[in-house]
Image (spheres, rainbow, N blue to C red):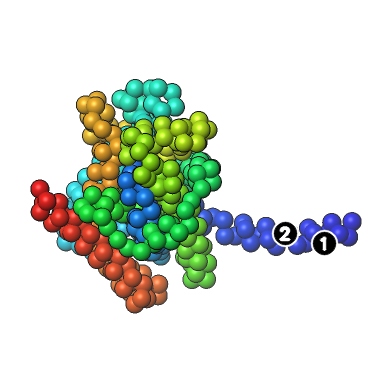
């Protein structure tokens, strides 16, 4: 009895501590689902199948950039009680704010393109559903997931985190089955390219990892907690928790991305297996080189990714419109508008994997338009007060923005020079 009482005394403080910090966790897991969306499947598997481990360094660098960027976005919403689009509308000239809104809506369409096609492909692989029908099913399920947000933000965050867990488990299973080449993995940490094709995939990986729509969204997810963090002491606790939240959630998403490339590099690079630069080919190749369980794990992870990321993308679109122009449309209308490009591609019979890769390139070009205002706002003491960026933080984020812009410009120059 004495032992039991002692155990209870030890557990109770831990439970109180968990209860105190738990409300601050969750937003980063919603943001992280965008870093493991179907666009990542296309770019990471294509990169591994075609170039082996060469682009490992791109995934690692992009994930580190994402951790920094999302942490800044979370801080902005938590400290100010306003999201990034709202602050842009408040502090930027109206024409600039409107222009940012237009490009953000285009980015939202590119995002939905990847997510709907990914869900449709997964349903086709699992159940033989025609791609256009699978696209419609993905839209309906994603809309149903969004209704959870109206029942409470915590419920929505919990379901999305659970789907991220499904994706992680699927790829950990396949990665353990496939194994890895430690030497080649280490060599892949050294930056290098192999012509314009590898640069295109690197840009796609970057666009699939550093996602502009969740730069906007993360600040909106944390602003709902700003009132509870009004007290300076509580705000410090909240900021520490959101940093941990971001590191853990994006760290898990980074493991998923790395596992994708490692699986493709280990099983398909130089193998001569046809079609392994497409998601259908990857699925068939997993069944051929491992077994049907590995292929099933891949398809289930792709389905979870398509459903979750599509709902998150639609939610981000609402945040963008409401913030930049102070207006919103019913979710059903937004769902119809953003699904249109994906449905056109599916109905036209275009190659879905190619469409996925190019959608991620479009997203990469949208990153600077979200990142530059974020850096500018978080370095202003009149906006974030005592939580203004340290110089090294601003420098690191500025370097990340510069690298993204330089990579995009280089891609354009090389592509048009070759053509």
Residue situated in front as seen by the camera: 359 or 220:
359
Q: Is residue 285 above or below residue 317?
A: above
Q: Which mark is residue 262?
A: none
- Tell me the quadrant of the picture where the N terminus can be found: bottom right
Alpha carbon separation for disc pair 2 and 1 = 10 Å
Percent position (x, y) of residue 259?
Answer: 45, 49
Is residue 68 visible in the rendered structure shown here? yes
Percent position (x, y) of residue 85?
Answer: 28, 55
Quadrant of the rendered image containing residue 23:
bottom right
Helix, strand or loop at disc 1?
A: helix
Residue situated in front as seen by the camera: 62 or 238:
62
Q: Is residue 289 above or below residue 230?
A: above
Q: Earlier in the sequence, mark 2 or mark 1?
A: 1
Percent position (x, y) of residue 230?
Answer: 47, 65
Answer with left or right where residue 179 lies relative to residue 285: right
Q: Residue at x 37, y 45 (%)?
A: 269
Residue situated in front as seen by the camera: 340 or 286:
286
Which residue does the numbered mark 1 point to in the structure image? 6
Helix, strand or loop at disc 2?
A: helix
Which residue does the numbered mark 2 point to in the structure image? 12
Percent position (x, y) of residue 310?
Answer: 36, 39
């Amino acid at each position: 009895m004495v032992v039991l009482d002692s155990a209870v005394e030890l557990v109770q403080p831990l439970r109180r501590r968990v209860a105190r910090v738990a409300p601050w966790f969750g937003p980063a897991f919603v943001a992280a689902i965008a870093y493991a969306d179907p666009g990542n499947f296309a770019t990471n598997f294509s990169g591994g199948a075609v170039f082996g481990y060469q682009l490992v360094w791109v995934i690692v660098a992009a994930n580190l950039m994402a951790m920094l960027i999302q942490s800044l976005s979370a801080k902005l919403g938590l400290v100010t009680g306003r999201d990034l689009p709202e602050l842009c509308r408040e502090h930027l000239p109206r024409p600039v704010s409107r222009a940012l809104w237009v490009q953000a809506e285009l980015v939202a369409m590119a995002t939905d393109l990847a997510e709907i096609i990914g869900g449709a492909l997964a349903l086709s692989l699992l159940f033989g559903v025609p791609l256009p029908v699978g696209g419609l099913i993905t839209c309906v399920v994603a809309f149903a997931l969004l209704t959870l947000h109206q029942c409470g933000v915590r419920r929505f965050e919990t379901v999305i985190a659970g789907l991220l867990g499904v994706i992680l488990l699927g790829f950990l299973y396949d990665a353990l089955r496939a194994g890895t080449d430690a030497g080649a993995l280490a060599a892949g940490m050294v930056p290098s390219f192999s012509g314009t094709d590898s640069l295109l995939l690197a840009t796609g990986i970057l666009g699939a990892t550093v996602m502009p729509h969740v730069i906007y969204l993360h600040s909106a997810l944390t602003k709902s907690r700003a009132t509870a963090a009004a007290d300076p002491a509580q705000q410090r606790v909240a900021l520490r928790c959101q940093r941990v939240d971001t590191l853990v959630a994006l760290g898990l998403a980074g493991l998923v991305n790395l596992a994708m490339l490692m699986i493709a590099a280990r099983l398909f690079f130089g193998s001569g297996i046809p079609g392994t630069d497409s998601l259908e080919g990857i699925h068939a190749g997993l069944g051929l080189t491992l077994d049907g369980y590995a292929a099933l794990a891949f398809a289930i992870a792709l389905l979870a990714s398509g459903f979750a990321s599509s709902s998150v993308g639609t939610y981000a679109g609402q945040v963008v419109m409401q913030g930049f122009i102070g207006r919103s449309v019913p979710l059903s209308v937004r769902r119809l508008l953003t699904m249109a490009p994906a449905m056109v591609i599916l109905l036209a019979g275009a190659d879905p994997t190619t469409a996925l890769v190019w959608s991620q390139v479009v997203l990469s070009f949208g990153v600077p338009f979200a990142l530059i205002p974020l850096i500018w706002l978080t370095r202003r003491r009149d906006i974030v007060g005592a939580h203004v960026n340290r110089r090294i933080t601003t420098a690191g984020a500025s370097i990340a923005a510069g690298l993204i812009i330089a990579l995009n410009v280089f891609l354009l120059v090389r592509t048009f020079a070759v053509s």
